[in-house]
Image: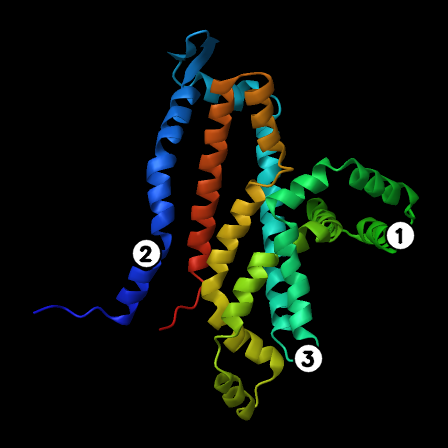
Amino acid sequence: MKKKVGLMGRRALYGYLFILPFILGFIFFMIKPLGQSLRMALSDVVISNQGFQLNWNSFANFKKAFLIDAEFNRMLLESISQMIFRSLATIVFSFFVALLLNQKFKGRTLARSIFFLAVILSSGVLVGLESNNALMAEIKKLIEESGNVNSVTEVLEEILLSGSTGVGGISSKVFEKVFEIIDSIYDVAMASGIQIIIFLSGLQTIQPGLYEAAYMEGCTKWETLWKITVPMVSPLIPVCWIYTIIDFFMKSDNQIMDKINTQMTELLNYGFSSAMAWIYFVVCMALIGLSSLIISKVVYNYD
């Protein structure tokens, strides 16, 4: 007797069919370059008239990255620290913007379109135009030079940092991170387009009857936010978090990516650059796995 496939089985099947083109593309076009890159990371690469000659050197390139290179460890730690704070800010910003865009008000479609522009503006082509455009660079420089040094945010930052006291300077470090996020609000907003759309789609699947029943029981807006909205949207948080981490580590202004490209294209150190790329890849995967495991513990799963 043929066993019937349930709803969850059909959803899983549709999901695998959806990602099947990526799986096939990865198998046919990515596995071989990954293997070649790993071979280069474990070898001294010599370029000659016959092409690339790989001389096995075990883990010498990895030791050079960790023990000899003066910048790689510092850049790696700075990138991880910035990723944690910037990703948290992006997730929180995206969720509350999605809450606002989910409300009923005049011009809601226009407001949603404006926030969706962040997805278009953060695309690779426009980011390249922005970073390589001399006119944009000169305008940005002119604005920074003509801006008022004693701005409200800088004065407030000085007051809070000078008046903050704590054990080992913990309070001042927290304020520094907060103001760092505030100063980078443009980057946070530009990186929040996809997350806003994902959270907005999740908010629209919540049945209005749940809120009506909660209001009849005397719940406030604040209580419904934490008792209904957050639990119902929480399964989307791992998706947004993983996307945010990958997007951060692959940004065009990433200093580690710049160092890897410099070693590969300018200095022709293919073995050393491959080793740094593999270290960077493993660290990214480890952070994604660890953070996903932690987030999955607080996600509310419902049928």
Residue type at mark 1 is: Ser
Task: Of the two numbered discs 1 and 2 on the same chain, state the one appearing first in sequence.
Answer: 2
Spatial CA distance of label 3 from label 2 is 38 Å
Q: Decide: is 293 above or below 63.
A: below
Q: Nearer the viewer, residue 209 or 71?
A: 209
Residue type at mark 3 is: Phe
Single out the residue that lies furthest toward the top: 49
Spatial CA distance of label 1 from label 2 is 54 Å
Badges 1 and 2: C-beta atoms under 8 Å apart?
no
Question: At 71% across and 47% down in the image, what residue appears?
Answer: 173
**Colouring of the image:** rainbow
Which mark is on residue 17? Answer: 2
Q: Decide: is 53 above or below 29.
A: above
Residue type at mark 2 is: Leu
Which mark is on residue 105? Answer: 3
Q: Which residue is mark 1?
A: 151
Secondary structure at badge 3 equals loop
Q: Quadrant of the N terminus?
A: bottom left
